[in-house]
Amino acid sequence: DKTLLSIAIDGPAGAGKSTVAKKIAKKLNLEYIDTGAMYRAFTLKVLENGLDPKNENEVLSLLENTEIIFLNNHIYLDGKIVDEEIRNNSVSKNVSYVSSYSEVRKKMVELQQEMAKKNNVIMDGRDIGTVVLPNASYKFFITAQPEERGKRRYMELIEKGETDIILADIIDDINKRDKIDSTRKESPLRIPDDAIVIDSTNLTVDEVVDLIIELIKGVNKIVL
Ligand code: CDP
Ligand code: CDP
């Protein structure tokens, strides 16, 4: 349906995609879809079943009997809300292996495309503008320097009350995950040709939100 609006947001870990996308969803009355949460939920199931995320056959053996739904800002794994569990460290460390398998991606992409056919959406991930919604109404690529992204994740964990965390380890994990995500064969993380790139290193959340809304509304139209 051509009348539906879709906003694609891609970028590396900790760039602020989901924080920004949620705020824009509220302001513009769009459905927010967190595609990373879907890959995280499936990774959680792989780990809960004692399977090896680096073993493609083991991972794929679970795929058919798995139901993953992102609805009203909650992620459901086989009918159970797993919003908290999918953020744990072992999921973060393993999700990039699980998300690299083409069968896994195929299933998630189909689900994501179905959602975009039903509502006006803002969707964030790694392959939204390139693969999931190649005809999105608007495409943005949000990034920030790795040290800044690591600091943001670190602050989140401190605020959650975690104590035994080391900033350097978090930056290291983020860099590792970005490397796997951008070098994998299947739909690697890359800037879509027609995306607007926003470097949020020195911007606040609200500055990024306002910038995107201005760009969508055409206030900052570049005149050639
Ligand atoms: O929020 P954070 O940046 O930590 O990651 P996320 O958006 O929750 O995504 C977790 C992982 O899922 C990424 O590192 C990718 O491996 C994978 N992912 C993907 O492959 N494709 C997407 N569209 C979204 C996430
Ligand atoms: O989804 P993604 O992994 O790109 O990032 P996120 O989960 O939204 O986390 C970004 C964190 O950095 C959040 O704690 C935000 O409050 C903070 N932050 C941001 O998102 N954007 C800025 N410009 C500054 C800080």
Image (cartoon, rainbow, N blue to C red):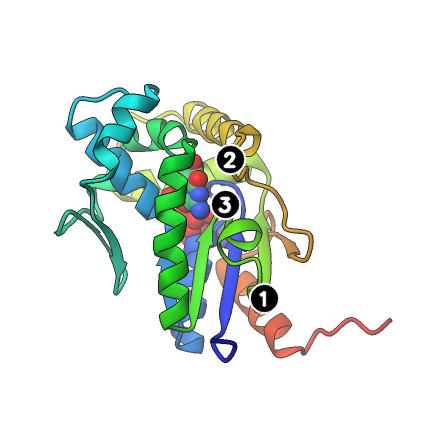
Answer with the quarter of the image where residue 208 lies.
Answer: bottom right
Percent position of residue 172, x then y: 47, 24
User: Of the numbered discs in the image, which one, if any, rests on residue 138?
Assistant: 1
Does 30 sit above or below residue 175? below
Answer with the quarter of the image where residue 71 lies.
Answer: bottom left
Q: The disc labelled 1 sits on which kind of residue?
A: Tyr
- Rate crowding at label 3 as few (under 14), some (14 to 19) or many (20 or more) other CA atoms within 10 Å: many
* Disc 3 to disc 2: CB gap under 8 Å: no
Name the N-terminal-most of marks 3 and 1.
Answer: 3
* Disc 1 to disc 2: CB gap under 8 Å: no
Q: Is mark 3 within 8 Å of ligand 1?
A: yes
Does 42 sit above or below residue 37? above
In the rendered image, which residue does mark 3 sit on?
126
Q: Secondary structure at mark 3?
A: loop
Percent position of residue 210, x then y: 55, 69
Q: The disc labelled 2 sits on which kind of residue?
A: Glu
Q: The disc labelled 3 sits on which kind of residue?
A: Arg
- Rate crowding at label 1 as few (under 14), some (14 to 19) or many (20 or more) other CA atoms within 10 Å: many
Report the residue at 38% width, 56% height from top. Answer: 112
In the rendered image, which residue does mark 2 sit on?
186
In this rendering, the label closer to the viewer, 3 or 2 = 2
Task: Judge by depth and name the residue closer to the eye, 160 or 113.
Answer: 113
Q: Is residue 90 visible?
A: no
Q: Is residue 184 visible?
A: yes
Which quadrant of the rendered structure holds the C terminus? bottom right
